[in-house]
Every structure is written in structure tokens, then in C-alpha cells.
Image: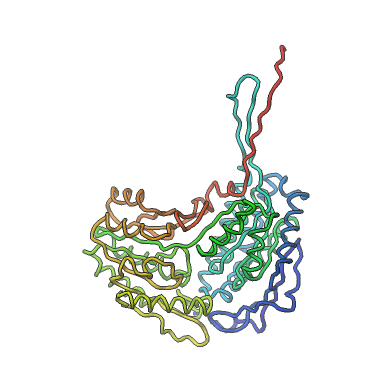
Amino acid sequence: MMNSQPALPQSPTSYGHYIDGTFSSTGTDPIERRSPAHSVPVSLYARGTEQDAEKAVMSARTSFDQGDWAYTSGAERQAVLQKTADLIREQAAELGRIECLESGKPFRQALEEMEWAAGIWEYAAALCRHLHGGTTNTLGRDLFGMTLKEPIGVCALITPWNFPLLIISQKLPFALAAGCSCVVKPSEFTSGTTLRLAELLSQAGLPPGVCNVVTGLGNPVGSTLSSHPGVDMVSFTGSTTVGNSIMAAAAPTLKKVALELGGKNPQLIFDDADLDYAAEAVCLGAWFNMGECCNSGSRILVQEGVADELVQKVVEKSRAVKTGDPFDEVSVGAIINGQQFEKIRDFVERGKEAGAELILDGTQVEQGQGRFIAPTIFDHVPADADIASEEIFGPVLSIIRFSDQAEAIRIANRTRYGLSASVWTANTDRALYCTRNLQAGTVWVNTFLAGSPELPFGGYKQSGLGRELGPEAVLEFTETKTVVIKMEQTDG
């Protein structure tokens, strides 16, 4: 078992903004981040102002308009991104430790995320040499057409606290692969690994000003970036509510907006499914990252004939899940902050009031100074209850029973979200039918949370706009220019 005490810092690490290749001081009023698992100060961040955001945008603007990055060859960009992937792997233990301290996630999981992030940088590096337009030679004798894929310009990348390095790695390498310059605004709770990433990019050869990081609160930093006329695109991951406000802020300048937002993701388990595998997937989907995951499989729809058996298996497995100090051998770590902790507890009370049966209560965990909630399960949940339709972002599972396929799909699609879903069945026709009729950006069949940088990720409905990852991810950060050439006719 890992020992938690040696990992705790004696004093917090101080971080300033990273603008134009240089770190600033934290200033006179820094943001203090305390470990959600240990309640000790672990980080001090500069409290960004509108002026700080303005300075970062100007740095990115200058690097894009007057610098060389937008015109470097695909091979040169590939080398920088590949080197960054290598450096993430080299620094994985330190990066994982920072995320464990700041987010409360298990250290083992944080290490895995560093490898996933490095893999995305590697994949984006390969795309650098495959970005191209096309030609059209069917316009007549004297006309020739072609299209160019050009970097969209300055991109503001705003990221949440639940997967700090992983989520910026779903945006930044693709923006850089396209030739864009960027300003990154990480969550004020988990900014450490993003700032360290800026250092690694510099070591890998990225020119100053191409990637800038401003820390602080959403207002004023995020709001300034979203509305700034010098920003050409905003890519945001977070709640649907904040996504709405970003769209509104971006509207006056008609900048491009890409959004990866919330989810209330169903797993449909039919009576011919392998219940042992399904139960394992239910536990993974519900308890991974303390349920603080937009892809959390927090809504289980199970066919009535096998519901009791599945519920028994899920409860048994969930009782064995260890919750506690993230530096120990646990699967569920600490809740990110007090506000989220109380929000989760409030949802549990609302579930009781809605008439759902609380069959596993993890809200009474005592773990020293930290904020912990163990796996919590409701059975016989009304399909219209808040816990069955709203994103909780915590380790709370709702089990809903259905009679047939039509009812399962109807229940699955009744939320405002459409991020992901899964289908568990041995019937291929049923699997394909459900896949085609579920309103979700990703549908898994007989698995859950399987993914790869090669596969696009994004949602339907209020789960977002656009797609991250996949072969077309770099195109999100480009404009298409059409060129038409008239050729003079010659006799010879």
C-alpha cells in the first residue's frame, strides 16, 4: 500500500501566469488551493484579471499574426508535439502527484491519465503532416479551383477541474497542429499540470507566445476570453450552464465556439446480457473519478426480469470498492470542493424525497480532514426524478427498471443530454437498433468507457457542439479558403 504522508508538501507551490514564454509572480492576492483529501495548502495561483487575459490574448495575437508557427511545416510541428508527448511520459509521476493533490483523484488513476494524455499528443503529432485541402479540375477549360485549410487564429481553451491534463490534451495539441496560437484558462482548482505543460511545450521547442496560460476565476478571465475580439475561437469543456454563457459572450463577435458539456449517460442492460460483465462496467462507469466525469454511467436502465440479479451483483461489487486517501490503494478519492460535496448530498436527499430506494449510502464516510463520499446507489428510481435526469457529478447511481426495448430507448432519450450511452445484449439486431435510436455522441455495445484518440468525442443536444479527438479534430481549429484561378488561353 502506498503511504500518503510523504507525498504531502511542506508548503504550497507558487504558480504565476505563463504569458509570452515567461512566468509571472503569483501577485499579492493569490488563490490558495487546498488538497480536498488532506485539507493542506498545496498550490498558490495568480488571481487573473481582465488585464492579464488581455495581455495573454495580445501575446497570442502577435505570435499568430507576426510569428512563424502558423507557417511552420507539418514536420516541424510534429516534432514539437511528439517531444511534448515524450516529456509528459518522463514527468508522469510528478504530474500525477500534482493532480492527485489538487483534484483528490486516486494517484494510480492520475498516472494512467498521464499516459492517455501522452497518447493524444502523439496522435495529434501524426495529424500535423496530414492537414491539407483539395483541388477541383471540373470548372471548365479556363478555371481551376482549390481549397486551403488555414489555422483559425487565436483560440481560447477553457478547461474544467476533473481531468486537468487530459482535457487540455484533447484541445491544445490539435489547435497547435493546425498552426493556431492559444490562451488556456484552466480551472482555479486544478491549474498545476496545465502550467507545467506550458513549460514542457517550451522545452519541446514551441515558440514564445504560441501557448499562454492565465489562471483565475471564470469571471473575469474566462468571460474576457470568450468575448474578446482578438480571440477567433473558444473551446470549452464544463457544465451546460457555463457553456450557455460562453455562447452568449461569444455571440457579438461571431467567433467559433466548440463545447463539450454535461451528460446523464444511460447503460441499457437487457435480459440476455452477460450480467457479470455488465455489473463490472456499471461500477467502473459510476465510480470512476468519484463520478466527477461527464461520461459517468450514472443511469442504469435494466430489464425487469434480470433487475434484481444485476442490482445484487452491483451492490456486492460496490461494497468492495475502497474510498479514501488518494495516495493509498483506493478506487474512489476525495470530492473536489465543499460546494460539490454539498451538491451531491443534496441530490441524495432529493432522491429519497422522490421515492427512490436508497440501497447503498456512501455519504457517511469519515476520513480525517478530507471530503469523501463512497458509492451510493438508488434502486426503483422514477424515470422523471432529478437523480435520473440531472447531472450529479458524484458517486451516485440511479437504477431504473424497464419492460421492453421501446420503453428503454424512450427513457434513455428523455433527458436534455446526449453525450454517451451503452447497450448490453447478446442480440446483434437489438444492439444495432438501439445504437441507431439512442441520442448520444458515443454508443458502446457490451462495454463502457472504451476509447482511443482515433475516435471522435462529443455530444448531441445540450451535451455540446463539435467533436474532439479523431482524424478530423484538427479541422475544428481551421478555416477553409476557396481559391479560384482563371487561366489565360494560349495557342501553344
Q: Quadrant of residue 96?
A: bottom right
Q: Position of residue 303 (x, y in %)?
A: 25, 62
Extreme right residue here? 66
Q: Is 143 drawn above or below residue 282 in the view shown? A: above
Q: How many marks?
A: 0
Identify the residue at image location x=55%, y=68%: 111
Q: The C terminus is located in which quarter?
A: top right
Q: Is residue 322 visible?
A: no
Q: Is 481 drawn above or below residue 122 in the view shown? A: above
Q: Quadrant of residue 81?
A: bottom right
Q: Quadrant of residue 391?
A: bottom left
The one of 445 and 19 positioned closer to us in this rendering: 19
Identify the residue at image location x=68%, y=27%: 485
Q: Position of residue 346 (x, y in %)?
A: 42, 78
Extreme front residue here? 252
Q: Position of residue 430 (x, y in %)?
A: 28, 51
Q: Is residue 240 visible?
A: yes
Name the colour scheme. Answer: rainbow
Q: Is 483 drawn above or below residue 437 in the view shown? A: above
Left or right of 428 on screen, residue 217: right
Q: Position of residue 68 (x, y in %)?
A: 76, 48
Left or right of 488 on screen, residue 163: left
Left or right of 21 on screen, residue 443: left
Extreme top residue here? 491
Q: Is 205 drawn above or below residue 486 in the view shown? A: below
